[in-house]
Amino acid sequence: MSGNIKQERKRVDKWNIRFMKLAREISTWSKDPSRRIGAVAIGENRRILSTGYNGFPSDIEDSVERLRDREEKYKYVIHAEKNCIYNACLNGISLQGASLYVWGLPVCSECAKGVIQVGISKVYYGHVTDDEYDDAYWTRSFRITQSMFDEVGIEVFHMNDNDIR
């Protein structure tokens, strides 16, 4: 992603590292064999508001067959960021002014709409490798996300893997 992404080096503190590590841990809950993404929303006073990982909706069977068939899987999977938002809504928790930590990929343009709509003000993402940008669809999606975030004033920070030991 380009645009106004800030390298988090100046602002990496123990809490940012802890929350990104938590997003990384949450990503391990995903059963997706090709991509595990985790998200955690943090509110005032460093309170955990909600979590999410990429997976199927509640009570929908996430069979090995469905997960291995990429075309079939995409019909069912909910991204970690949207799951985090849905979980907050399910529990009556506002995400207005919250920070969102995402492990695995930057926020796609579809999830960005939800992030904007619920009032999240900062997005931190980590663990993105160069091959993530080889896919034209995702590259375009990340650029759209950055454009939308710039327009509404959502701050975006990339946390380097070396900072998240």
Image (cartoon, rainbow, N blue to C red):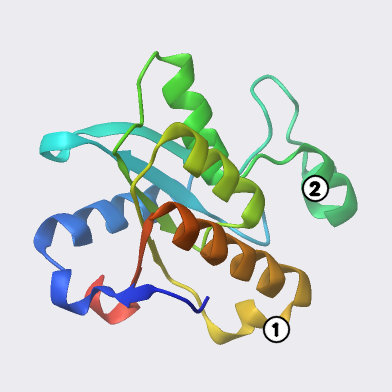
Whether residue 43 is situated above or below residue 102 in the rendered picture: above
Residue at (43, 47) in percent of width and height: 39
* Numbered-mark total: 2
Residue 16 versus residue 56: which sits nearer the camera? Answer: 16
Residue at (81, 53) in percent of width and height: 68
Q: Name the residue under label 2.
A: 74
Local crowd at mark 2 within 10 Å, few (<14), some, or many (≥20)?
some
Pinpoint residue 159: horizontal percent, then vertical percent.
Answer: 32, 71
- Position of 99 with respect to 13 (left or right) is right
Residue at (29, 57) in percent of width and height: 21
Q: Mark 1 points at which residue?
A: 134
Q: Nearer the viewer, mark 1 or mark 2?
A: 1
Pinpoint residue 15: horizontal percent, then vertical percent.
Answer: 14, 55
Disc 2 is placed on an element classified as: helix
Q: Quadrant of residue 145?
A: bottom right
Local crowd at mark 1 within 10 Å, few (<14), some, or many (≥20)?
few
Whether residue 142 is situated above or below residue 151 in the rendered picture: below
Residue 89 versus residue 62: which sits nearer the camera? Answer: 89
Mark 2 or mark 1, which is nearer the start of the sequence?
A: 2
Q: Can residue 52 be seen in this view?
A: yes
Pinpoint residue 72: horizontal percent, then vertical percent.
Answer: 88, 46
- Position of 159 with respect to 76 (left or right) is left
Q: Say which amino acid is labelled 2.
A: Tyr
Q: Say which amino acid is labelled 1.
A: Asp
Q: Can residue 165 be seen in this view?
A: no
